[in-house]
Image: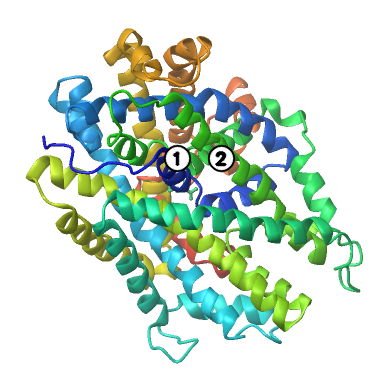
Amino acid sequence: MAEKSDAWGSRVGLILAMAGNAVGLGNFLRFPVQAVQNGGGAFIIPYLICFLVMGIPLLFIEWSSGRFGGKFGNHSTPYILDSMVKGRVLKYIGVFGIFTNLAVAAYYCYIESWTMSYVFHSIGGTFVGMSQADVAAFFGNYVDISHSTTGIPYEAVVFYVICLVINTYILSKGLKGIEKVAKIGMPLLILFGAVLAIKGLTLGDSGASEIFPDANAWDGLNFLWTPQYSSLLDLKVWMAAAGQIFFTLSVGMGTVHCYAAYLEEKDDVALNAVSAGFMNEFVEVVLGSLIVVPIAAGYLGLDWVIQNAGFGMAFQTMPYLFQQWGPALAMIAGVLWFGLLFFAGITSSLAMGTPWIGFMRDEFGWNQNKGAWSFGFIALILGLPTVIFFQEGVFDEYDYWAGTVSLVVFAMLETILFSWVFGMEKGWPAITNGADIKVPIIYKYIIKFVTPVMLIVIFVGSLFKPKDNDWSGNLSNLFSGNSWVLDNGSIIKTITHAGIREQIALATDPSVIA
Ligand code: MET
């Protein structure tokens, strides 16, 4: 246990840093894909309900736990949980909040490094005159690290290392560094996003071509934003919505606790948590919906978007679509788009460094500099396999275990601990003391009953995810006396050798990556 060694400079800085932690690549790359793959407007209602009954409660839990632990001079989840309930096992649960971050930072910074590289390629005019297939192939060459797309050998590795060094350097400056990046990065991100969103909104059917005569940007928006109630009983959509809420709010990771640990005891957590959470939702639901999907639908049609929705659209399709605006505007759009992704990424990856640095301080008394550079080094070692063996599916494994499974496990355990072991008698004041808003009392009961039950259901659901994610089919199978067939993506099947083999086979199938 160490003394409080750092502090947030201002409330605006804290909220922007927390919002920056949440607003990330997930808002622009993951949300639109999840929404399209889960029926567009059919996704939005489960998503918003998950935000209200799981996202907001988890933000309250994590902000208040962080402030509570910080009171005793703790800066990392093992120590924060230990200050709430004594017991060795809690320290081990808190360790999730350290290792998840190291592993996520390792692969997350790799995507962040692509965005840096693509800013330079946009400025340098690399994509000028390229066909859609050329732009897609460019990405394939880029991640195949033996190729060079600029003449720099091992370019992807070089950008990755530069990206980690930038993160580490900023982290070595402490909270002041993080706050400064958030104060610059968040407004720029919103500005860049707004410009691209206006373009997406005003595109209409002007991008329609002979090949895609029906293309219309509005189809993309209508598809995402017209609520559909038919899927409210589809568990697959609920699981996807819940997964997106975890990812986008950065809950279940430990980053929120660690940022909040630097608050003073009298500081508000309730309004801050809600403000940062809503800022993230604005960026996700509004800006995240208004760029990739409408622009792609405007040129290639909604059917194309539905069939091709995937993580690759941002890097494999957008630079080609920007070219339709002429070289000068294409360059500007490329800089805005990849610049926006870079700011979104770095404000999140910086947060992933703080749990490790805090833990080294709590456990060994390490200073900020030593903590930061050791974080950068570990992320590099963990990240190199994702860079070198990207096409062999290592990246996807990291995303699955660190970026998906462990968030759910940690969120479930911390919620049970907070509501039932620490107890709501202490938990409710931990949230409401010093609050600048009146937190609706209903949240006391949501946090105690609804959130833990939902998290347990989601955890058990991901253990036993059915084949092809077909919940209704498998449930009726089960009731008619047949067996439950597990999907390769279920946790249980994935931990078996066969599951991993099949996953890698899937990940190495070029049609899946494209
Ligand atoms: N919340 C950030 C994002 O949306 C970081 C998530 S890391 C699991 O990208």
Residue closest to the far front: 10
Inspect the image, locate mark 2, and give the three-letter code of the amino acid beneath it: Met
Which circle, 1 or 2, is nearer the viewer?
Answer: 1
Residue closest to the far left: 364
Gap between marks 1 and 2, in whole Å? 9 Å
Q: Is mark 1 within 8 Å of ligand 1?
A: no
Q: Name the residue that disc number 2 marks.
A: 279
Residue closest to the far bottom: 151
* Residue 81, x across and y down, in percent: 23, 27
Q: Do labels 1 and 2 touch, CB within 8 Å?
A: yes
Scheme of colours in the image: rainbow
In what element is the residue under mark 1? helix
Of 112 and 388, which appears nearest the observer? 112
> Which residue is found at the position 76% from the left and 28% from the top?
229
In what element is the residue under mark 2? helix
Of 376 and 184, which appears nearest the observer? 184
Q: Name the residue that disc number 1 marks.
A: 15
Quarter of the image for residue 171 reads bottom left
Going by the image, does 124 lie left or right of 373?
right
Which numbered disc covers residue 371?
A: none
Answer yes or no: is residue 500 visible: no
* Residue 193, x across and y down, in percent: 64, 57
> Which residue is found at the position 35% from the left and 46% from the top?
496
> Which residue is found at the position 41% from the left and 35% from the top?
408
Quarter of the image for residue 409 reads top left
First of labels 1, 2 by sequence position: 1
